[in-house]
Amino acid sequence: MQEPLRAPVNDHGVAHGFTSVDAQPRPADWVQILDRLSAEPFYVAYKQRLQEFLRAEAGGLFLEVGAGTGDAAVSLRSRYGAEVVAVDSSLTMIAQARSRGVVHAAVADGHRLPFRAGQFEGAWADRVLQHVTEPLRVLDELLRVVRPGGRVALADPDYDTQVLDIDDQELARRVLRFRVDVALRNGSLAHRHAGLLAARGLHDITVEARTLAVRDPSAAENVMGLRTWAHTAAARGYLDPMDADQFVNQFDDAVHEGRFMYAVTFFLTGGTLPVPS
Ligand SMILES: C[S@@+](CC[C@H](N)C(=O)[O-])C[C@H]1O[C@@H](n2cnc3c(N)ncnc32)[C@H](O)[C@@H]1O
């Protein structure tokens, strides 16, 4: 029996829905969020590239941790003929993955993977380490279950790279800092993934940076919730409520003047496990 996950809040008492999808008021909404994002050309392109980092071959067995709807698992199988096991801590997500054709899909916590050491040719986690309680433990689990000489691939946005065009750039920075330091558990880890792999003896490490530039304010507002971040910060005591109002006014001005722009950089990192001599 799986141990329960820790409470779906970070050390600051703020929860992100992806830390515990099943505990959200409407878990199905989080499936829709993933679907909306993964239909965007930016996401389609980086996800394809991330799969290339795995160097998958037909018949090889691969693991995706935090697989969400299972679309990437289906895609790896159809592109390369690889076998994929998909795990996610959310039953809602795993039910989706099964309904979309992932045969080997199971509820499991990335901190305690229910697999033997060295069982997989490769493993990946896409936009997962940012949400977990102990990212290094999840990384070590991921590495444990991959065979010597096998491949791992990681992707996450690094929220330390965020920029937003509103008039008051100092206010923008404060709200964006709330996003990275408080609203996410590990919002600025992605630029360190390569170093973490190197420290664990991996070689052939590749890093690619891809910047998501959002010019459509409805995408940012509805999918990323950007317009609401300042009031979330104020409600938690991280921002003066008047500053939060000011942020929203300036956000709306930028939209009406056609100059809305928000950007964040994603890091894609791959590496090869050492072969003991
Ligand atoms: C942002 S979604 C990404 C889903 C998918 N990888 C994708 O790129 O579409 C993060 C996923 O990680 C899962 N997750 C969060 N914490 C987890 C944990 N400790 N173990 C396994 N999965 C976890 C969530 O349930 C969610 O499905």
Image: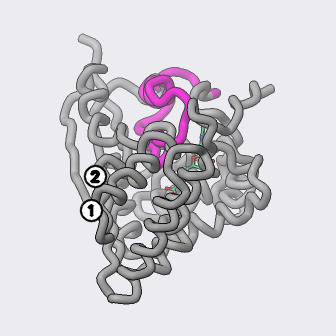
Q: Amino acid at mark 2?
A: Thr
Q: Identify the secondary structure beneath mark 2.
A: strand
Percent across and percent down for residue 179 are 45, 50
Q: Residue at x 36, y 80 (%)?
A: 254
Indicate which disc residue 161 carries.
2
Q: Residue at x 59, y 66 (%)?
A: 33
Left or right of 140, for residue 52: left
Q: Identify the secondary structure beneath mark 1.
A: strand
Q: Is mark 2 within 8 Å of ligand 1?
A: no
Left or right of 53, for residue 136: right
Residue with the mark numbered 1: 211
Percent across and percent down for residue 202 are 26, 26
Residue 164 in view in this figure: yes
Q: Is residue 103 above or below residue 182?
A: below
Mark 2–mark 1 CB contact (< 8 Å): yes
Camera-near label (2 vs 1) is 2
